[in-house]
Image: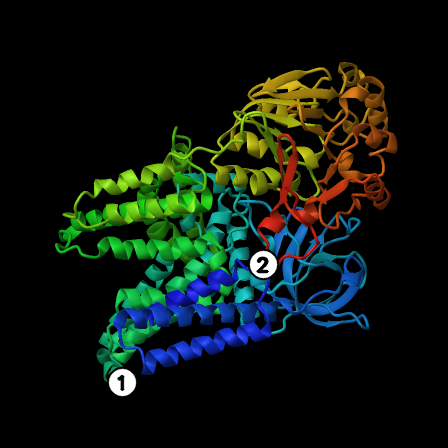
Amino acid sequence: MRSFILGFVIGVSCLQTAATLPSTKQMAACAAAAALLLLACAYAIRHPAARIATIASAGLLAGFTWAALLAQTTLAPSLAPRDEGRDLHIVGIVETLPYRFDQGVRFDFRVERSLDAGVGVPPHVALSWYAGRHGAGRAVGDVQPGQRWRLTVRLQHPHGNANPGGFDYEAWLLEQGVRATGYVRAGDDNTQLSAFVASPSVLVERVRAALRARIQDALAGRTYAGVIVALVIGDQRGIDQADWQVFNRTGIGHLISISGLHITMIAGLAAWAVSALWRRSFFTGARLPLLLPAQKAAALAGAIVALLYVLLAGFGVPAQRTLYMLSVVALALWMGRLAAVSHVLCAALGVVVLLDPWAVLWPGFWLSFGAVAVILFAGHGRIAPPPAGPRGALLLAGRTQWAVTAGLVPLTLLLFGQVSVVSPLANAVAIPVVSFVVTPLALAGSLTPGPPGDWLLLLAHWVVEMLAWLLRHMAGWPGAVWRAPAPQAWVFALGLGGTLWMLMPRGWPHRWAGAVALLPMLMQLPDHPPAGTFRVTAFDVGQGMALLVETAGHRLLYDTGPAYAPGADGGSRVILPYLRMRGIATLDGIVVSHSDTDHTGGALALLEGVDAGWLASSLPDGHPIVRAARRHVRCVAGQHWEWDGIAFDMLHPTAASYADARLKTNARSCTLRISNGHRTLLLAGDIEAAQEAALLGRARNRLRADVLLAPHHGSGTSSTLAFLQAVRPEVAIFQVGYRNRYHHPKPEVYERYGTLGVARLRTDEAGALTFDFGTDVGWRSYRAEHARYWYMRYGVGDRE
């Protein structure tokens, strides 16, 4: 059975890396082959090794087929292209816990019917209802789970930014069954039809909403109210990005939710209480143990409480894993059969992947099961039990923490490009505090009405404050985090083998050699382009700009992407994850072209997250980004420097332009020319026609470039014919958001590039673009290199 489950998981994982789904005939063939292999194993194959291999192969085919079938079914409902961006009228039910933010509210909507004839709307859509934007100042509806609404909406296909090391929003939407996203339009047609439409899932969401409201009322204005909410109902959206940075740097992020440890603790308390009361029922005359053994009653109670708590958690992978493991143990007790720990873990693994094949895409899945597997491996083969009493408990806890920390180093570096060095110490403090103090207080306070409950919640918040203060100090220690590039396959395999060798029981020969095998992984350095060449990565940040320029020994970031929402921006969501994946901790320089938020949105997050040597911009002296920079230089035409044989020339703005208060911020966009003597890149920011004309007048002979970052995202006020004829680019980059509200690039401008024979690359279609400038220019698109079956097909190709 374990072989089949492991094969099943491998098969599901293979499907989730496929660019296209198999045909119905291919799926039928895989299913038939799996059945034949199982029959052969049952009646013909007797050799143990051959049986294991055959069963694993059958599991792989079954997993691949199952994941493909589920993906095909989930992808089937779709929005017709002609219905994107037009007003649609729908009736449905709010089916998830809404998330409220400064500009409005977001929620998932189960569509019951479309009121427009001939229009098909997917059954599950994700909606935003804005107060100012799109809504012209209209009030946002007080949406609650279970309400039925008639809404006027505008929808589009699921679309997210596509970048190396970034979060795959499209895959996450597919996992949730959401096949369209959009926003509610302002108007009197938006009407609540029913206050509550009952269903099991909606009832759970209503309970979660009530508990969240209870906590937010009791902790109004408190810094860590979002942490308390996360510990009670698993909703992490209220936690500030700055707090997440501290939690992740100290390695305790896994605790800031309903974790497996919390579920096990609550289920264990429930089982203990039921067992104690069940045994004492003779004093009441009930004689319950004669009807059902206390052990079985306790197991049933623990499983039920675990299920309820997991439902409150939103059914995340770590919570699912714990629930299924506890359920298998409870079932084994009921059936009078002892279950081996490895069987329990494999059963939980199989159920999680069977119910949610997309779980294998997320780091939490691998870290969750990896942690349990490491604990089992580290405890295997140890003959002498730890000493009894508190000393033994501390010794066991320390040994377990050491095993988890060391055992997950290869996986953590592979997934995140960094390892928290202070994690063992931080977890030694945080695990008991969060699990045995904060979580019980938060649960008791949430369920207790009136002032007593408020006092418990305030006490829980105070403990979190004290813990956060300590963690902030730990996160600020020099060397708190070890960064390295995501390892290659052979380096990862060597490091994993070394870790397992190091975790062997005492007496195993040369355990220290395991640490040596980890060194290639830990000591990796970020790669650089060869001398005399440079590499440029144009990120897919939506409607904004951000490009990383790399030479043989230096790195420069041009613009930092937009601000998406409070605490979310292109820096924290796109650029920093990419830099961590590459193991890049320092930037030699940052250029912020001008003050528009689609260029400056991620600057503060980047200045906090990486060590930047200097920052050049056209920002005013008092700007927060200028104040945050270690060294600020004003962009001025004529500035020149060379890195590793690569010339950097600032062409705009002029020094005199800073004295002209009439100029828009776009007019002072820092325009940078980069060349290796063979090939040239021109980064034009948001300059417009007047600035293009000025450049033609004073620097026409410097404008020729092979690759041009389209000025102002291809707006109608830029990319004049005379300017393009002077630049004569072979390739133009359009950094734009999918179906952006500015309609960039403008059709007439986009056509102008095409008429001139310029290859046009759009980040909303291609994802992140990587250019290699040598004696020639080659480029790659992320969506083509990392093609997945859930991506929309845009016909974007690569050229080398």
Q: Position of residue 25 (x, y in %)?
A: 57, 75
Q: Position of residue 671 (x, y in %)?
A: 73, 25
Q: Which residue position is annotated with label 1? A: 291
Quadrant that contains the C terminus: top right
Q: Name which residue lies at 23% across and 47% down.
A: 399
Q: Viewer-proximal residue, 714 or 756? A: 756
| Extreme residue toward the bottom, this view | 291
Q: Name which residue lies at 39% across and 71% down.
A: 304
Q: Position of residue 275 (x, y in %)?
A: 26, 72
Q: Which residue position is annotated with label 2? A: 19
In the rendered image of this protein, does residue 773 appear above or below residue 432? above
Q: Viewer-proximal residue, 750 or 51? A: 51
154 with respect to 799 (left or right): right
114 with respect to 752 (left or right): left
Q: Amino acid at mark 1?
A: Leu
Q: What is the quadrant of residue 726 in the picture?
A: top right
Sequence-earlier tag: 1 or 2: 2
> Which mark is drawn over residue 500?
none
Q: CA distance from mark 1 to mark 2?
A: 57 Å
Q: Is residue 676 visible?
A: yes
Q: Amino acid at mark 2?
A: Ala
